[in-house]
Image (tube, rainbow, N blue to C red):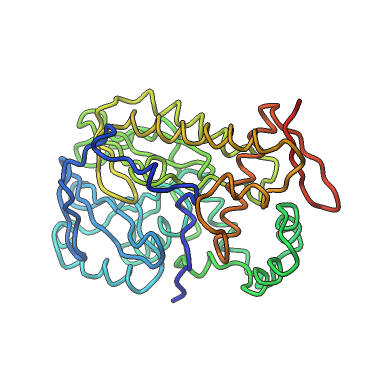
Amino acid sequence: MAEPAFSPDASLSQDESFVATSHRGLTYPLGGRTPAVGEAISVARGVDWVRIPMAGPLDHINCWLLADGDTTTIVDTGLNVDPSVDAWRALFDAQPLAKRPPGRVICTHFHPDHTGLAGWLARKFDARIWMTRGEWLTIRVLTADARDAVPDEQIAFWRAAGWDGAQIAEASGKGFGRMRRMIAPLPLGYRRIVDGDRLAIGDATWQVVVGSGHCPEHACLWNAADGVLIAGDQVLPRISSNVSLGVSEPEADPLGEWLASIDRLMELPADLLVLPAHGEPFTGLHVRLAALRDEHLKRLDILHAHLTEPRRAVDCFGRMFRRRIEGDMLGLASGETLAHLRRLEVEGRATRDVRDGVWWFRAKT
C-alpha cells in the first residue's frame, strides 16, 4: 500500500513560537497519556479514544469510538496503509469493539487520513458511512479521477504560483491522483449529515457543527450535555490546519471561510473538552481559536507589507514560512500562500495581474 510523503492536514506556517501550551490557556486533562496501538482510553461518557498510526510528519490520527447501543459509532478512520489496518485489527479483539462492533462510520471530512479506511470498515461490518454532502462528493470525485498524467490545468496552476520549469517537471514526474491510493474503495451510497443535525448516538445527542476553509464542509460533533467537541481538523492544539487555494476552485476564498468558521466556533462554550484529530484532548477552546485567528491575520499583514512591488506566490515564501520550501512541500506552501494572497485580494488590499499565465500580486494603494 502506498504511503504519503507528507500530510495535507498541517500548515507549513507553524513553528515553535506558535505552539500552544497550558501556560497560554490550554490544559491537557489526560496529562500526556496517549493510547497504545490496540488500546482504547475513555475520555468522556460513552467516548473512547484510539490512536491510529500513519506515515509522514503527522504520525497518527485520533479516532473516536462512541457507544451506540449494541454497536459502536466510529469517527474518522486513518489511511489505507498497513499500519492503520493492523491497528484496527488489534482493536477488533479489544474492548469496546469486541463487545460492540462498528455500526456506522462518521467522517469529519474528505482527507484520506480521515476517510482512508471508511470503505473497508463499512464493508467489513455492513456499516453506513455518514458525511456532509460537500465532503462526500469531493472524495468521490477525487477517487474517481484515474488519470496518471498531470492535467494541463494543474500545470497551469503551478505556473501561476511562479514555479519554474524544473519544479513543474519534477512534480509532474510523480504523477497524479495519489489520493486514490490512500483510500479503500468507497460504497456508492452514504448517509448525509448537515449543519445543525442532532444525531442520537447511544443515550447522547451530538449536534453537527460545520466549518470550512481547510476543506469544503467539515463536520464537528458537539455534545452540549457532556461538554465535548469532536473537532477533527477544525481545531488542533499544537498545529494549525492547512488552508490552501487549489486548482479545483482557484477563485475561492478558503482563508475567508476559515476565519468565518473560527468566529462561529467562538459561539460554542469556552470550557468544552476538545477532541482533535491530531495531538491530545484539551480544554481552552476560545484561547486556541483566538491564537489561530490572530496568526493568520498576522500573516496577512506581513504579506501586505511585502507587496510593495508585484510578487508571485513563490516570492512570498520567506514571509510566510520559517523553513526551506522544497520537494513535496512546494505544493502545500504554494496553496497556503495563494490562500493568503487571495484573501488580501478579496479584502481589497491587493490586486492581481496575470502575465504569461503567472499571477503577480501587489498591495493596493
In the image: residue 324, left or right of residue 352: left
In the image: residue 297, left or right of residue 46: right
In the image: residue 354, left or right of residue 190: right
Seen at 15% across and 63% down, the residue is: 98
Q: Choose between 344 and 277: the one closer to the eye.
A: 344
* Picture quadrant of residue 310: top right
Seen at 44% across and 33% down, the residue is: 195
* Picture quadrant of residue 114: bottom left
The C terminus lies in quadrant: top right
Estimate the x, y position of residue 343 in percent, counting from the top left: 63, 34
Seen at 56% across and 55% down, the residue is: 332
Seen at 74% across and 40% down, the residue is: 361
Q: Relative to residue 341, is residue 48 depicted above or below?
A: below
Estimate the x, y position of residue 247 in percent, counting from the top left: 67, 52
The N terminus lies in quadrant: bottom left
Q: Relative to residue 23, is residue 161 depicted above or below?
A: below
In the image: residue 226, left or right of residue 191: left
Q: Choose between 120 and 273: the one closer to the eye.
A: 273
Estimate the x, y position of residue 242 in percent, counting from the top left: 50, 48
**Image mark count:** 0
Estimate the x, y position of residue 109 in percent, counting from the top left: 45, 48
